Image (tube, rainbow, N blue to C red):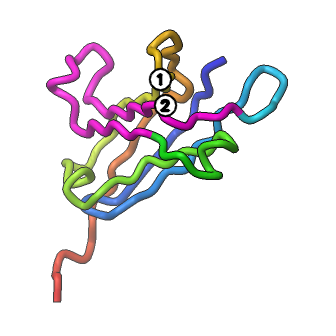
């Protein structure tokens, strides 16, 4: 089942989303080596080339991944997007590409930054 969740960030801020991947019984899935695809678009019918934010993360061999926990780190460049409401999804793909599944989807809001100075 795909979770629906609204996410938000502030324009040009760093953000680190933590996700948990579990099976139907609620047990953690070892996601070591899995790819996480995080994509934000103006509308869901836009091509991946038109994505406003596009991140691919390979889950490292560590205790978090073994416990089904992954992270999507966003940089200031990633979130340097016009403020507004968008759509996003997060897909997982196992190491053999035999499993590819959307695990979270929803609306993504970018809020206008107030402070713009760097020093």
Mark 1 to mark 2: distance in Å?
A: 5 Å
The answer to which of 119 and 91 lies nearer the viewer is 91
Secondary structure under the numbered disc 1 in the rendered image = loop
Tag 1–tag 2 contact (CB < 8 Å): yes
Residue 44 spot, x, y in % from top left: 32, 19
Identify the residue shown where x is 16% and y is 26%: 50
Crowd rating for badge 2 (residues with CA inside 10 Å; few <14, some 14–19, many 20+): many
Relative side of 57 to 106, left or right: left
x, y (%) of residue 76?
Answer: 24, 61
Identify the disc placed on residue 104.
none
Residue denoted by label 2: 34
Q: Residue under circle 1?
A: 95
Within the magenta stretch, is there residue 57?
yes
Residue 97 in the image, given as x and y percentages of width and height? 44, 14
Q: Is residue 36 above or below residue 8?
A: above
Q: Position of residue 36 (x, y in %)?
A: 44, 33
> Start and end of the magenta stretch?
29-58
Q: Residue at x 58, y 29 (%)?
A: 4
Left or right: residue 78 compared with residue 18: left
Q: Residues within 10 Å of mark 1 (few under 14, many from 20)?
A: some
């Amino acid at each position: 089942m795909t979770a629906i969740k609204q996410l938000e960030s502030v324009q040009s801020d760093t953000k680190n989303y933590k996700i948990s991947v579990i099976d139907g019984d609620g047990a953690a899935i070892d996601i070591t080596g899995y790819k996480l695809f995080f994509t934000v678009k103006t509308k869901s019918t836009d091509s991946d080339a038109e994505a406003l934010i596009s991140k691919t993360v390979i889950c490292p061999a560590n205790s978090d991944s073994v416990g089904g926990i992954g992270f999507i780190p966003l940089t200031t460049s990633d979130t340097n997007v016009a403020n507004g409401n968008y759509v996003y999804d997060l897909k997982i793909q196992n190491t053999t590409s035999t499993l590819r599944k959307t695990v979270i989807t929803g609306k993504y809001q970018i809020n206008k930054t107030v402070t713009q100075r760097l020093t």
